[in-house]
Image (cartoon, rainbow, N blue to C red):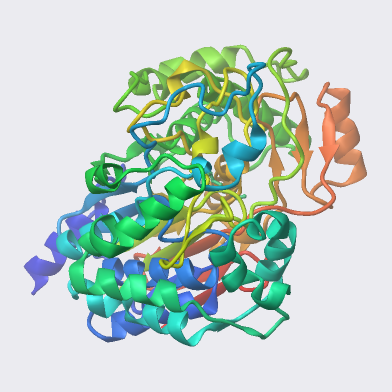
């Protein structure tokens, strides 16, 4: 038993720069933090039925796909970062959507060469081939312990019996109503009798329940082939889209080696391309690693962190894209020497202006897309960020399937230098190509420290990376999971050259001092993000979980 425990301890510590000999206490309880109580409850239910964290991840993802459709769904995709306790394996399941075979670089340009933003964001032409269901099957087959049919059961019930409408989904339906009204199947779910559902009114999705049942019965073939696939392709093509049955049949998930990096004794395991998040976080932390931020004067700290963000987002726009299509210099971008060069260009007293390329708009609120974190009592962990892209995505439900299609094509660069919905710009590395995955910012992350493990992530478009970064820095300062998710946020993404602040994030004196250094402050009227995190103290075995207080439906439960 003792040998087994020591062996397990070694596995649990794999990836930790500070492997030490003291015994690891397995988590005394399981922790799940997600964006909706029904999803968190579904995860715990599956654990109670003998499932592990990976089975629970299917249940949480699938339930979110029903009750938080504005954020993620089976018509979308995402990344599940896994840590398997038994052998210490860290892997990212890449269920990102891919561009259909008929997609091409100019597909959203009008006759004047301008991007048609409506086509890029609304309706089925905006939709890439979904990856979420293929992710479920892969998780169940290779990492889980229970049949897919069992893990999908809570989601099937939620779709068939309905869930009560809540303010966040109601707001998104209101915002998207004009697009939803174009499509009868979308109207039927979100605007029954032409009305936005009232708070507490049940949103029932019988077609979606049937589609999930087909997946429970046939695995991914229940979605990527047969009746559901045929109905989706027919509906897409009748409404101006370009999907084919072959596109669906050809979809495959990829197992990616996560990006790993060290920061002052902490070992990070985070998202690999096609996410830009892990690389950007590694660059930023490498730049910052030379300084002791914890005891630093606040203004100086924000200035240096901002300058590091600026430089990493500049690299994002130039170098990053799907590594199956473009060569991304990962080794270089995540190397401490490279960061040392970038650090040398930072003045401690002056902001460096970012003086070219177009700017960003002010919408990304950060509620659309979802993140959840899980630790089970064996020490298995999942950090998953899943998305349909913007709120209620393309607004298009394929008739007879209940599947709301993503608008992830907008995460490609539709034209070099042209900002997408999050103001992100890109170039050739992220241009549209058939079968390519659009560049993402989603950054599910694990941190292994001497006595603690952290699992965290958030939605928020381009701000995901900086939110995760600020959560990490707060963790490195010694604060707990409740603090990581609630800390006030600031953000810089190179262009436009603005330091974005959440409402009340900084006091007037700090703002003035940053302005004196040359930072252009953009005071946001509200807040952003929806972080869900879990921690495990390896010395005591204590597990803690927290959900972002900014959104009211977050649900963090340890039991
Ligand atoms: O993959 C990405 O980076 C985006 N599609 C995520 C979108 C998102 O977080 C929306 N929330 N505001």
Q: Quadrant of the C terminus?
A: bottom left
Q: Position of residue 91 (x, y in %)?
A: 26, 47
* As drawn, 200 above or below 250: below
Q: Note whether residue 531 is visible.
A: yes
Residue 61 in the image: state x and y as whole percent: 40, 66
Residue 51: quadrant of the picture: bottom left
Q: In the drawing, does residue 219 fall left or right of residue 289? A: left
Q: Between 542 and 201, which is closer to the camera in this rendering?
A: 201
Most foreground residue, 465 or 431: 431
> Picture quarter containing residue 535?
bottom left
Q: Is residue 559 above or below residue 375?
A: below
Residue lying at the far front in this picture: please name it. 238
The residue drawn where x is 45% and y is 16% is 338
The answer to whether one can see residue 422 in this image is: no
Q: Quadrant of residue 110?
A: top right
Q: Nearest the camera: 171 or 472?
A: 171
Image label count = 0
Name which residue lies at 34% across and 72% down: 212
Residue 415 position within the rendered picture, expressed as x and y whole percent measured from the top left: 57, 20
For the point 87% across and 28% down, the residue is 515
- x, y (%) of residue 263? 44, 37
Q: Nearer the viewer, residue 211 or 136?
A: 211
Image check: 513 left or right of 110?
A: right
| Quadrant in which the N terminus is drawn | bottom left
């Amino acid at each position: 038993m003792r040998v087994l425990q020591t062996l397990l301890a070694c596995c649990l510590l794999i990836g930790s720069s500070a492997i030490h000999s003291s015994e690891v206490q397995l988590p005394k309880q399981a922790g799940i933090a997600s964006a909706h109580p029904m999803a968190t409850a579904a995860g715990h239910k599956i654990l109670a039925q003998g499932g592990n964290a990976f089975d629970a991840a299917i249940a949480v993802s699938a339930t979110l796909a029903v009750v938080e459709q504005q954020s993620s769904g089976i018509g979308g995709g995402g990344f599940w970062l896994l840590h398997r306790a038994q052998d210490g394996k860290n892997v990212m399941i890449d269920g990102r959507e891919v561009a259909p075979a008929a997609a091409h670089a100019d597909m959203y340009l009008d006759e004047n060469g301008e991007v048609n933003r409506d086509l890029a964001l609304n309706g089925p032409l905006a939709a890439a081939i979904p990856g979420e269901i293929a992710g479920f099957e892969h998780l169940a087959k290779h990492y889980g312990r229970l049949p897919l049919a069992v893990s999908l059961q809570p989601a099937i019930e939620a779709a068939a019996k309905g869930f009560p409408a809540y303010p966040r989904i109601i707001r998104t339906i209101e915002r998207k109503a004009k697009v939803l009204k174009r499509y009868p199947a979308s109207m039927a779910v979100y605007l029954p009798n032409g009305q936005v559902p009232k708070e507490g009114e049940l949103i029932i999705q019988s077609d979606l329940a049937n589609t999930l049942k087909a997946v429970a019965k046939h695995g991914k073939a229940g979605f990527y082939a047969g009746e559901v696939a045929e109905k989706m392709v027919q509906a897409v093509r009748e409404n101006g889209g370009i999907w084919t049955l072959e596109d669906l049949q050809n979809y495959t998930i990829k197992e990616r080696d996560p990006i790993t990096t060290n920061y002052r004794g902490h070992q990070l395991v985070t998202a690999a391309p096609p996410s830009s998040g892990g690389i950007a976080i590694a660059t930023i932390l490498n730049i910052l690693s030379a300084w002791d931020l914890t005891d630093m004067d606040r203004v100086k700290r924000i200035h240096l962190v901002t300058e590091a963000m600026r430089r990493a987002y500049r690299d994002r726009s130039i170098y990053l894209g799907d590594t199956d299509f473009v060569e991304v210099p990962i080794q270089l971008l995540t190397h401490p020497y490279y960061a040392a060069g970038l650090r040398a260009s930072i003045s401690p007293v002056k902001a460096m202006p970012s003086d070219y390329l177009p700017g960003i708009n002010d919408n990304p609120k950060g509620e659309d897309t979802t993140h959840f974190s899980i630790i089970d009592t064996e020490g298995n962990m999942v950090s998953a960020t899943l998305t349909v892209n913007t709120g209620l995505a393309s607004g298009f439900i394929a008739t007879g399937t209940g599947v709301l299609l993503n608008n992830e094509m907008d995460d490609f660069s539709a034209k070099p230098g042209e900002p997408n919905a999050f103001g992100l710009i890109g170039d050739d590395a992220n241009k549209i190509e058939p079968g390519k995955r659009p560049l993402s910012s989603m950054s599910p992350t694990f941190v292994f420290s001497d006595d603690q493990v952290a699992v965290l992530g958030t939605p928020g478009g381009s701000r995901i990376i900086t939110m995760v970064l600020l959560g990490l820095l707060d963790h490195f300062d010694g604060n707990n999971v409740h603090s990581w998710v609630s800390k006030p946020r600031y953000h810089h993404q190179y262009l436009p050259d603005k330091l974005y602040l959440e409402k009340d994030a900084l006091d007037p004196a700090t703002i003035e001092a940053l302005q004196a250094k040359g930072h252009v402050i953009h005071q946001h009227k509200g807040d952003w993000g929806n972080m869900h995190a879990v921690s495990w103290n390896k010395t005591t075995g204590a597990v803690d979980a927290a959900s972002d207080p900014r959104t009211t439906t977050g649900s963090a439960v340890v039991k």
